[in-house]
Amino acid sequence: MVDESHLPERYRNPKRIARGGMGEVYRAEDADLARIVAVKLLSGRFADNDAIRGRFTREALAVARLSHAPSTVTIFDVGEHRGRPYIVMEYLPGGSLADRLQREGAQPVGRSLEWLGQAAAALDAAHANGIVHRDVKPANLLLDSDDRVKVADFGVASAADLGSFTEAGTVVGTAGYLAPEQARGERATPASDIYALTVVAFELLTGKRPFERESSTAEAIAHVSAPIPPASDSNPELPPEVDDVLARGLAKDPEHRFASAAEFVGALRDALDRAAGTTRVGALPPAAPARERSRLPLLLLLLGGALLAGVLAATLLARDDGGETAGTTAPRTVKETVTLPGTTVVQTVTTAPEPAPPTTTAAEEPPAESPSESNDRGFELIQAGRYEEALPLLESAVAGLAGSGDTAEAYANYNLAFARRALGQCEGVVQLLDRSEQVQGKRKEISRLRKETERSCGDEGDD
């Protein structure tokens, strides 16, 4: 049972939802504004410690300066009640990335990139205001009702013009996410936050931290001296290009890291796009006029039918000719090859010495290709403007990759939506785009195609 006397009367029905560090966090009802809030209350054992009380107050001041920053928890109120400082902030019902990792392990690449991008926006805004978080970790990356990340708990943050509140040589932060300079007790900088965000990225993509050890002390030491392990060793589905980006983000020397959190996330996204090769999401190529597209398949069909009839006639003539040659001791083979743009037909007929039905030697069936390979071929056909031919390949790829949650599924869904729109089709396009965005996060190409579809198709694109 929570003692409500610790909180001002306006915050009713408190329920503790987190505990640790300097304080406890409660979910409560703000009676004055009729909304649910989170109230962070300084622990009673620290109430008489002036240094810690000052740190707690500085957290509120630091975050209040970022009230309009993207992806940052909003502060509503700061005060003190019965000798205990408190901070009232927005309540985020989605839990934290730590909760998600504990339940599900490694996350899909697209979802990870979206979360990392949101956290990066908040950290870069803080750095632009002279604030270093110093404790970036999944537990401090909270999720709202739409599954979007907001950065919380600037409790150990330092602000350039608010003074220092740690002694030299004091380690502040969480061992699993400490930059080497923090583990050595040196001053944290924006590069330290970028290092910690890289650790979070490693964990989201692999389900484990890069320097996990049995004790916090050993893990902190590993950040300082241990070689950086490739993430692809822990998750073989990750390409080596990702290892290079993570290695730079985890560089021991702060000067060798990325200049901003957004630059790090951008490099990670680019590495995944490069590794995906021809399955990447590209700009929509100019489509042929709808009338020309509708006539072309029919023309090819008619040409193909005429060719096939001609070849069959040549085959029958060859067979009759063979049957009139008496005393033949060796089989006779006739091959007819006819080629027109986009169509090639080959027919081989073997006649036996005695009258018998011809034996046709069929070409061996090619090995079945994977859904990713079908997607690659479909993409190449799209680039060549051959949308009709791409369609069945991409439909097969989408079906084969459904539910995999990797980038190939995202690209296959986009490419199929892309091909359908190029052919003037609307059915299911928005749903395909929704799935692509769900897996790989928001992309300007997806948004552009969605807007074009909604403008041209209306409700048809959702069918």
Image (cartoon, rainbow, N blue to C red):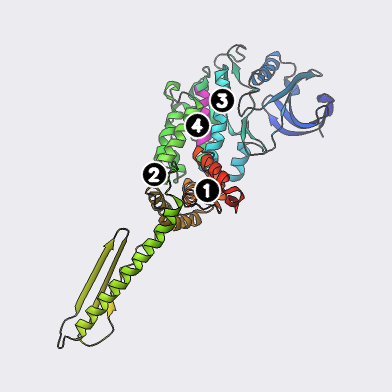
Going by the numbered disc 2, the residue's amino acid type is Gly
| Tag 2–tag 3 contact (CB < 8 Å) | no
Judge left or right: residue 431 versus residue 386.
right
The x, y position of residue 180, in whole percent, is 48, 24
Q: Element under label 1? A: loop
At horizontal 37% and vertical 66% (from top left) the residue drawn is 302
User: According to the image, label 4 marks what residue?
Assistant: 198
Q: Earlier in the sequence, mark 2 or mark 3?
A: 3
Going by the numbered disc 4, the residue's amino acid type is Thr
The x, y position of residue 308, in whole percent, is 32, 70
CA separation, marks 2 and 3?
31 Å
Q: Earlier in the sequence, mark 1 or mark 4?
A: 4
Q: Quadrant of the N terminus?
A: top right
The disc placed on residue 277 is 2
Q: Residues within 10 Å of mark 4 (few under 14, many from 20)?
A: many
Going by the numbered disc 1, the residue's amino acid type is Gly
Q: Earlier in the sequence, mark 1 or mark 2?
A: 2
Seen as rendered, the residue at the extreme front is: 291
Tell me if residue 390 comes above or below residue 136 in the rendering. below
Say which of 42 and 388 sits in front: 388
Q: Residues within 10 Å of mark 3 (few under 14, many from 20)?
A: many
Judge depth for marks 3 and 4 and give the one in front: 3
Judge depth for marks 1 and 2 and give the one in front: 2
The x, y position of residue 270, in whole percent, is 43, 36
User: According to the image, label 3 marks what residue?
Assistant: 123
Q: Magenta stretch: give its range.
A: 191-201
The x, y position of residue 380, in whole percent, is 38, 49
Q: Indicate yes or no whether the magenta region holds residue 196.
A: yes
User: According to the image, label 1 marks what residue?
Assistant: 405
| Figure quadrant of residue 275 | top left
CA separation, marks 1 and 3?
27 Å
Report if residue 458 is visible in the image.
Answer: yes
